[in-house]
């Protein structure tokens, strides 16, 4: 049990490291929390800093979801611990300890965590996002669609009720963080890629 708690704490602390803020500081760019949409995530960093900064942010956010889960997997913990570590990493991104509990929307961190739990889940999720982005050119719609399908993918690929429940909780948290995007989608004012 001590190992599980340590891994969960590791997941939360890793998630709490804001790639967007660190990348912007290192590249001499404005704080993404104070410019653009105010969201410390890759999409807003693209607005304030360009493609390179956004790519680095996306990579960092994905890795902080992926690495704690891979460490847990290497320690041969039960699947429910993998799912809880993934949930902790995403929660850390949404509510980061190191940045006043004001985090991003969790899409890239969730994707990294999903990939760590099951590479096929990560692939299915990424393929869904890419297809939706190609069809509609709206990042938030792509993420919301992929998150909405996460429970189905998780159950089909793992057939584990507890793990599916934890991955569904991640999807629910990320969808909840997109409340302003959902409103804009309904109003037809959401920005395009």
Image (spheres, grey):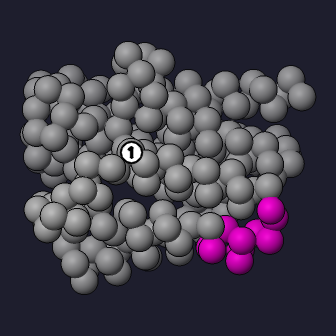
The residue under the point 43% across, 54% down is 175
Q: Which residues are magenta?
A: 152-161
In the shown orientation, is residue 89 left or right of residue 43? right
Q: Nearer the viewer, residue 181 or 150?
A: 181
User: The C terminus is located in which quarter?
Assistant: bottom left
Quadrant where the N terminus is found in the figure:
top right
Determine the residue positioned at 43% across, 76% down.
128
Left or right: residue 139 versus residue 19 is: left
**Is 47 inside the magenta-drawn segment?**
no
158 part of magenta stretch: yes
| Residue 118 seen in this snapshot | yes
Q: Specify the quadrant of the image occupied by residue 11.
A: top right
In this rendering, the count of numbered labels is 1
Q: Position of residue 91 (x, y in %)?
A: 53, 35
Residue in view at x 76 percent, y 69 percent: 158
Q: Look at 50% across and 46% down and name the residue there.
A: 173
Q: Is residue 112 visible?
A: no
Where 150 sits versus 11, above or below? below
Q: From the viewer's perspective, tell me whether residue 177 is left or right of residue 46.
A: right
Q: Pinpoint residue 59: horizontal percent, then vertical percent.
A: 38, 47
Measured as percent of width and height from the top left, residue 94 is found at 44, 35
Q: Secondary structure at mark 1?
A: helix
Q: Is residue 14 above or below residue 160?
A: above
Work out whether residue 147 or residue 128 is closer to the camera in this orientation and state it: 147
Badge 1 is on which residue? 177
- Label 1 neighbourhood size at 10 Å, few (<14), some (14-19), many (20+)? some
Closest to the observer, 162 or 6: 162
């Amino acid at each position: 049990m001590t190992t599980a708690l340590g891994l969960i704490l590791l997941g939360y602390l890793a998630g709490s490291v804001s790639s967007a803020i660190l990348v912007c500081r290192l590249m001499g760019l404005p704080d993404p929390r104070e410019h653009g949409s105010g969201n410390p995530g890759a999409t807003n960093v693209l607005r304030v800093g360009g493609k390179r900064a956004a790519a680095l942010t996306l990579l960092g956010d994905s890795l902080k979801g992926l690495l704690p889960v891979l460490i847990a997997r290497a320690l041969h913990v039960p699947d429910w611990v993998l799912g809880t570590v993934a949930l902790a990493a995403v929660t850390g991104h949404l509510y980061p300890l190191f940045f006043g509990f004001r985090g991003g929307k969790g899409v890239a961190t969730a994707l990294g965590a999903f990939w760590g739990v099951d590479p096929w889940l990560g692939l299915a999720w990424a393929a869904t996002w890419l297809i939706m982005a190609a069809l509609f050119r709206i990042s938030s719609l792509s993420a919301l669609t992929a998150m909405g399908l996460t429970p189905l993918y998780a159950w089909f690929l793992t057939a584990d009720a507890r793990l599916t429940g934890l991955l569904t909780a991640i999807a629910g948290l990320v969808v909840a963080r997109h409340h302003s995007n959902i409103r804009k989608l309904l109003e037809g004012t959401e920005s395009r890629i």
